[in-house]
Image: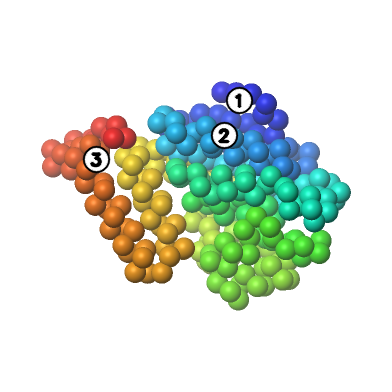
Amino acid sequence: MTMAGVEDIAVTAPADGVRQIALDRPKVRNALRTQTLREIAAALGDWAGDDAVHCVVVTGGETVFAAGADIKEMAAKDAVDVLLDERPRHWQAIREFPKPLVAAVNCYALGGGCELAMHCDVIVAGEGAHFGQPEVNLGLIPGGGGTQRLTRALGKAKAMQVVLAAEFLTAAEAVDAGLVGEVVPDGDTLARALAIAGTIAAKPPLAVRLAKEAVLKAWELPLAEGLAHERRAYTLLFSTDDRREGVAAFLEKRPPRFTGR
């Protein structure tokens, strides 16, 4: 499948209900220039209201996920340029995508690449993957949510080490720390991510959507408010056709036929 005006990503439909975004700037190790984020945000915006799309996989290919922002693009900017930059809008669009995002990470996910992976709901990493936020080496700090997401994932002490010393986490360290969900052989990363996406895509879409929302609220809300949000979502799902179908299929010992309603 193709999308008009796309230069930096390749979009495919590898399975029923699944879409795939592959970063496609290999000569610059998939550096995330503004155009790249714009295209990712546009694709997700199109799919947010598309009932045929249930889950999205984001990958950079076999040799790199994304090695950071586009330094050449950044070099000419001053503070006013950054203040007026469109990039925060694109990060927000990725963050607010209501359906599950699965990252397939090989080799390096650094700077903006690490932030993009952390915007995903599930991260599958190859054994040779490395994660890091080396912006301090350029006299900067992460600007796409890295300080906040990394701290929530790793805890203060480890996040400080990664951000202040610009040290990388190996895939094994990332999974032990809770940043990554699963580590697989490098050649199996995308296949495993697509398998997870396919499993998610077969689930009732409204339940998946509200489940994602509820888990994210656990990051953002005090416990009492998070529990109240969960209960409201749980109650709402009792009004759906898919809940009735799921229960009926279980009792009748047959595969369910979900409709997203």
- Residue 6, image x and y in percent? 67, 29
Q: Please name the residue shown 73% across and 53% down the image.
A: 83
The alpha-carbon separation of the residues under discs 2 and 3 comes to 28 Å
- Residue 96, image x and y in percent? 51, 47
Q: Picture quarter containing residue 24? A: top right
Q: Amino acid at mark 1?
A: Met
Instruction: From the viewer's side, name the closer residue of 82 and 160.
Output: 82
Instruction: Classify 129 as above or below 27.
Output: below
Q: Amino acid at mark 3?
A: Thr
Instruction: From the viewer's side, name the closer residue of 184 and 151.
Output: 151
**How is colour applied across the structure in the image?**
rainbow
Quick one: label 1, few (<14), some, or many (20+) residues within 10 Å? Answer: few
Q: Is residue 13 visible?
A: yes
Tag of residue 229: none
Left or right for 176, reference 38: left
Q: Please name the residue shown 39% across and 42% down the image.
A: 200
Q: Which residue is mark 1?
A: 3
Instruction: Classify 83 as above or below 240.
Output: below
Q: Secondary structure at mark 3?
A: loop
Disc 1 + disc 2, Cβ < 8 Å: yes
Tag of residue 240: 3
Q: Which residue is mark 2?
A: 43
Quick one: label 2, few (<14), some, or many (20+) residues within 10 Å? Answer: some
Instruction: From the viewer's side, name the closer residue of 183 and 121.
Output: 121
